[in-house]
Image: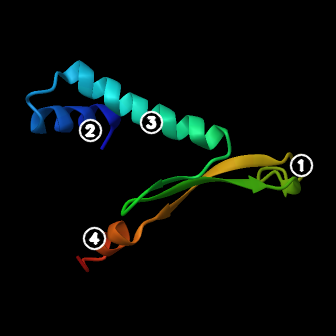
Amino acid sequence: MIRSELIQLIADENPHLFRRDVERIVNTVFEEIIDAMARGDRVELRGFGAFSVKKRDARTGRNPRTGEAVDVNQKYVPFFKTGKLLRDRLNGDA
């Protein structure tokens, strides 16, 4: 599912809301998650999962084409851990 499909689904299920308002709400939720992660905060959506940021230390990598050693700088990467409810639904337990 892509963002526009999510917006359309929510708008269809809530006919009292205008599509542009649903779009604004969805975009605000995503922006707030992104802003929180950029600050280094953890975002937890109960039953769904938790978004956090993990630090990857600098290391020496390898160029797969040439085999040459390459320095890879330290970086921060997003990490998502599923919640119990989501994990159970995916495994048919709920």
Q: Give the labeled residue for mark 4.
A: 89
| Numbered badge on residue 34 | none
**Which numbered mark, 1 or 4, is in the foreground of this view?**
4
Q: Residues within 10 Å of mark 4 (few under 14, many from 20)?
A: few
Neighbor class of circle 2 (other Cα within 10 Å; few <14, some 14-19, many 20+) is: some
User: For the residues marked 1 and 4, what is the alpha-carbon distance in whole angstroms?
Assistant: 42 Å
| Front one among 14 and 68 | 14
Mark sitting on residue 30: 3
Q: Disc 4 or 2, which lies upstream in sequence? A: 2
Q: Which mark is residue 6?
A: 2
Q: Residue 32: horizontal and vertical position, in percent?
A: 50, 35
Q: Which residue shows up at 19% across the image and 37% down it?
A: 10
Q: Residues within 10 Å of mark 1 (few under 14, many from 20)?
A: few
- Between marks 3 and 1, how big is the CA–CA gap? 34 Å
Say which residue label 1 marks: 70
Mark 4 or mark 3: name the one nearer the start of the chain: 3
Residue, far left: 15
* Residue in front for this viewpoint, 35 or 5: 35
